[in-house]
Amino acid sequence: MENARRLPPTWLMGLTNAPFGLTGGFCAVVIPELLAAHGIPAGHVAAIAAAILSPGFWIFAISPMLDAWLSRRTYAVIFGSLTAVAIAVTVAHPDRPGLVEAVMLPGFAAAMLYQGSVG
């Protein structure tokens, strides 16, 4: 009998979705609250949140790159790290809406690409 490859437990495989879900929640709930707490007008907060969440509509155009060049595991590490860095920068500088938008738009795109690489 050949050595059977041992599979990780199901709950661990499901946990790989956590970075995508947590980043989506951060972008949809926490960022608007952070910006509003720093006195940013509601219309501006809505525009920033809409821009940050926009990769949900257009990321499919660049997702085919996940099948070229690097392994999906490498892409997962890269995009997961980029997502974490984007969130850390946003938490450190919530009073700068331009920076929040500039960092979290590619950060959420990285989270979506992370999901594509592990899903």
Image (tube, helix red, strand yellow):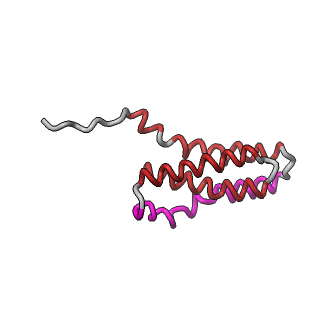
Q: In front here: 64 or 45?
A: 64
Does the magenta portion include 66? Answer: yes
Residue 2, image x, y percentages: 15, 38
| Residue displayed at 63% across by 59% down | 54
Residue at the right extreme of this rendering: 39
Does residue 46 appear left or right of residue 41 in this picture? left
Please state the total of marks drawn on the protein image.
Answer: 0
Name the foreground residue: 95 vs 44. Answer: 95
Query: Residue reaching furthest bottom?
Result: 61
Image quadrant in which you'd find residue 9: top left
| Side of 77 where 41 appears, left or right | right
Q: Nearer the viewer, residue 116 or 50?
A: 116
Prevailing secondary structure class for the magenta stretch in the rendered image: helix
Decide if residue 2 is on the left or right side of residue 24.
Answer: left
Say which of 25 and 69 sits in front.
69
- Estimate the x, y position of residue 98 in percent, counting from the top left: 77, 58
Picture quadrant of residue 38 = top right
Residue 105 part of the magenta segment: no
Q: Residue at x 31, y 36 (%)?
A: 7
Indicate the position of residue 88 as horizontal and vertical percent values: 68, 45
Q: Residue at x 41, y 38 (%)?
A: 13
Range of magenta residues: 42-69
Q: Which residue does the image show at 56% across and 51% down from the upper left? A: 111
Q: Quadrant of the N terminus?
A: top left
Instruction: From this view, report whether residue 49 is shown above or below residue 60.
Output: above
In which quadrant of the rendered view does residue 101 lie? Answer: bottom right
